[in-house]
Structures are given as C-alpha cells and as structure tokens.
Image (tube, rainbow, N blue to C red):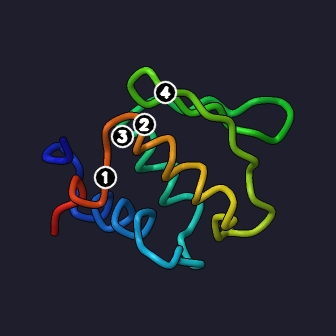
Amino acid sequence: MTEHLSSHHRAVLRKIFQHPVSHNIEWHDVLSLLEAIGTVERRHDDKVEVTVGSETGFFDIPAHKDTELEAVVGIRRLLEAAGYSEAGAPD
C-alpha cells in the first residue's frame, strides 16, 4: 500500500504510528504525506479536510510548525480506517 510513497513519506507515516506519539512531526511533512495518499482541502475556518480512500477527517491547522498531539492521534485513526497501519509503513 505504501510502495508509491517516497522514503520521506514512509518515515512520516512511521512517526504517525509511533508509540508513544512523536511530538516533533512537522505539519508540512504530514500535509505532504496526506496529499500523496489522498486529498487535502484547506478550509476558511483554519481547518483542513482530509480524505483518504472513503475516510474523511477535519483537522486544525497548527499555530506552530509541529503537528499537535490531538491531530496526530486523529490522523492515525483516519489512516487506520483507510487501511494504513504501522505494518503498512515499511523501512
């Protein structure tokens, strides 16, 4: 499922599924990954609408460069529901 992803995107995917949750995942890296596997639409309410497969989620755009913990957990749930997993993030 991740064969088409760059090594950088696979590294970001691993960070998203890391336990405990990594606190230093840069938002622009997460957006790049999500754009590679789905669609991302910036909304007027400082949120992004992310669709991966048949799953859709809404996430706040962080005020800083790092992705907020709550968003990482939500993105992980969205990706799991769309069929991605830690095992789906090979080295």
Q: Assign a secondary structure to mark 1.
A: loop
**Direction from residue 21 to residue 62 in the image, left or right:** right
Q: Quadrant of the C terminus?
A: bottom left
Residue 52 vertical placement versus 89 (above, below) = above
Q: What is the C-alpha distance between the residues marked 1 and 2?
A: 9 Å
Q: Are marks 4 and 1 in contact (CB under 8 Å)?
A: no
Q: Are marks 4 and 2 in contact (CB under 8 Å)?
A: yes
Residue picked out by circle 3:
36
> In percent of the image, x 38 and y 25: which residue is there?
53
Q: Nearer the viewer, mark 3 or mark 4?
A: 4
Amino acid under label 2? Answer: Ala
Q: Is 37 in front, or is 53?
A: 53
Amino acid under label 4? Answer: Glu
Residue 38 vertical placement versus 6 (above, below) = above
Residue picked out by circle 2:
81
Considering only order in the chain, which callout, 2 or 3, is on the residue closer to the N terminus? 3
Residue 83 in the image: x percent, y percent? Answer: 31, 38
Residue picked out by circle 4:
55
Amino acid under label 3? Answer: Ala
For residue 34, the mark is none
**Direction from residue 69 to residue 40 in the image, left or right:** left
Q: What is the C-alpha distance between the residues marked 4 and 2?
A: 7 Å
> In percent of the image, x 31 and y 68: which residue is there?
11
